[in-house]
Amino acid sequence: MNRSAMWRMNAVRECAYEIIEAADIFNPANPELGRLPDGRECHSTRLVVMDETVEKIFGEKIRAYFELTGISVEYLTLPGGDDHKTIEQVLRVVSRLTEIGTDRVGTPPIVIGGGVVQDVVGLAASLYRRGIPYIRVPTTLLGQIDGSVSAKTGVNYEGCRNRLGTFAPPPRTLIDPALLATLPVRQVRSGLGEALKMALIKDPELFGILEQHGSRLVADRLQDPGARADGERPGATVIRRAITGMAEELQKNLWETELRRIVDYGHTFSPIVEMSALPELYHGEAVAMDCVFSAVLAARRGTLPMMQLTRIVATVNRIGLAPSHPMFGDVPTMLRALADTMRHRDGHQHLTLLRGIGETEFVNDVTDEEVAGAARVMAVLARDPHACVSELCATTPTTGAPPLVGAVR
């Protein structure tokens, strides 16, 4: 059939946003928390969203900040945790934005908290009036070094991690490393799981810091207490190098038009495990395990030197993270995880494997037998985190043996 008419639209939208390190963010003398993205004055009410942990620890200081600075705000407190990362929580935020009369541009909400509440509010802001600006203040290490740079929002749906989401970066994200001082040790370790990912894919110097100072970073919560003669500040260096590396990678492919992304390292097999084990595993814990699984795959292929695999597992242990979990040792689960990730990557594996610490390659030919062999190594590591991984890779068969743990479906 002949066309009688056709119109083609072609538009480009500029996107620019800032990640700002600002000390003492809840001090009324510091204007950053209340500042609008474009520097204008705000004469209407803004919504401040906190998660329950932030409300408990910082709630009084946050309320005092806005009272003393004369900024008109209303508050909403949401539960944290991945089991509350739902579309229902998004709608709660949307309803509150409507109740207080949020404008299209001039009254951007402020979200203060961990990754779950950041994603929930980000998704709500991207949907409200087809998109309004918002300000985020991440209070976890994971949120500061990973989520702070991302343009993505999302909630879990029907058992799938971040199945519903948008690309909607806020104009401003404020990073205050001092907020990490109140984190539980496990939260710090989880955040370092994402730092480990960044170190493995592109930053050997960052890996060296994690390798040398892993346990100290956790104990100090990256606060670098005390003066050092050499001026070294490993905590501050980890935060800044991790953010810098993430920013370099995301800026050149912000909208993920290119599906081959080295920052997806550690995120191929972990989503299925993380959601299946919910709430047993934190995100960074599952990512670290995925990093080890993928390193085992590379070592068994002969592309990653065994000595470097040994260093990776030792560093994970030094941080206090578990290198594996029984689900990573279950062959059907790992095959299902890869199949689900391939759908997210348009039918391709686009699997990032290490050729060395800080050096990667993309592959699309990993076989079921290779996945099974790596899973059997991981099953042993789940029982004995300090097992000699190089010996396991050399002696564990790829085929001919049943899975070492029961299938998880």
Image (spheres, grey):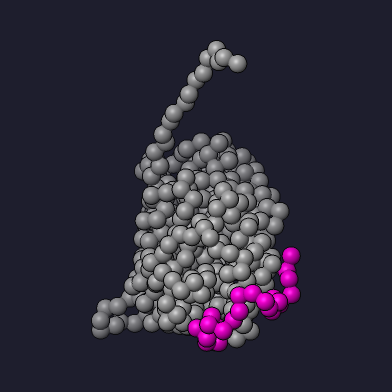
Magenta-colored stretch includes residue 250: no
For image coordinates 38% across by 68% down, the residue present is: 358
Name the residue at the top extreme.
4
* Direction from residue 276 to residue 359 in the image, left or right: left
For image coordinates 61% across by 51% down, the residue present is: 343
Residue 400: horizontal and vertical position, in percent? 67, 76
In this picture, is 292 found above or below 167? below
For image coordinates 50% across by 83% down, the residue present is: 390
Front residue of this view, candidates 329 and 302? 302
| Residue 393 location, quadrant | bottom right
Tell me if I can see residue 288 in this picture.
Answer: no
Residue 116: horizontal and vertical position, in percent? 58, 58
* Direction from residue 184 to residue 401 in the image, left or right: right
Magenta-colored stretch includes residue 390: yes
In this picture, is 318 found above or below 249? below
For image coordinates 55% across by 53% down, the residue present is: 348
| Residue 355 location, quadrant | bottom left
In this picture, is 330 found above or below 19? below
Q: Considering the image in quadrants, where does the C terminus appear?
A: bottom right
Front residue of this view, candidates 102 and 216? 216
Which residues are the magenta region? 385-409
Question: Taken as a whole, is the magenta stretch helix, strand or loop?
Answer: loop
Front residue of this view, candidates 31 and 367? 367
Residue 267: horizontal and vertical position, in percent? 54, 62
How many labels, in total? 0
In this picture, is 342 found above or below 38? below
Tell me if I can see residue 371 in this picture.
Answer: yes
| Residue 380 location, quadrant | bottom right
Residue 90: horizontal and vertical position, in percent? 63, 48
* Direction from residue 247 to residue 281 in the image, left or right: right
Q: Considering the image in quadrants, where does the N terminus appear?
A: top right
